Image: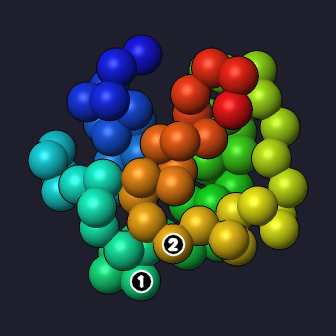
Amino acid sequence: MNTQEKLAALEDIMELDEGALKPEMSLDEVEEWDSLAALSFVVLLGDEFNRKISGKEIRAFQTVQDMLDVMEPGA
């Protein structure tokens, strides 16, 4: 999955329009990044990347890039 596909998946779970997210964006700027989106992100990681993540790791996210980094193989 390339970066654009990952961004599209994140936009989908946050119910955002295509192209709304940029890697450098702070998650504080994204109103749709909430507990439901975080739960959907956990499911996405499990289903698409066979990866588990803790709540502590999710709370440490500052930017969209932090989310993308976790979606990398071997992250």
Question: Mark 2 touching mark 1, by CB under 8 A?
Answer: no
Check the image and report above or below for 63 versus 68.
Answer: below
Q: Disc 2 or disc 1, which is closer to the eye? A: 2
Is residue 13 visible to us here?
no
Q: Position of residue 27 (x, y in %)?
A: 42, 73
**Along the line of sight, which residue is nearer the eye, 51 or 60?**
60
Check the image and report above or below for 66 versus 26.
Answer: above
Identify which residue is drawn at 23% across, 55% down: 22
Q: Position of residue 34 (x, y in %)?
A: 55, 74
Q: Which residue is mark 1?
A: 28
Q: How many marks?
A: 2
> Which numbered tag is attached to residue 62?
2
Identify which residue is drawn at 33% across, 40% down: 7
- Crowdedness of circle 2 by 10 Å Cα count: few (<14), some, many (20+)? some
Q: CA distance from mark 2 to mark 1?
A: 8 Å
- Label 2 sits on a secondary structure element that is loop
Is residue 48 visible to us here?
yes
Identify which residue is drawn at 56% across, 60% down: 37
Residue kind at label 2, given as amino acid type: Gln
The C terminus: image quadrant: top right
Q: Earlier in the sequence, mark 2 or mark 1?
A: 1
Residue 47 occupies which quadrant of the picture?
Answer: top right
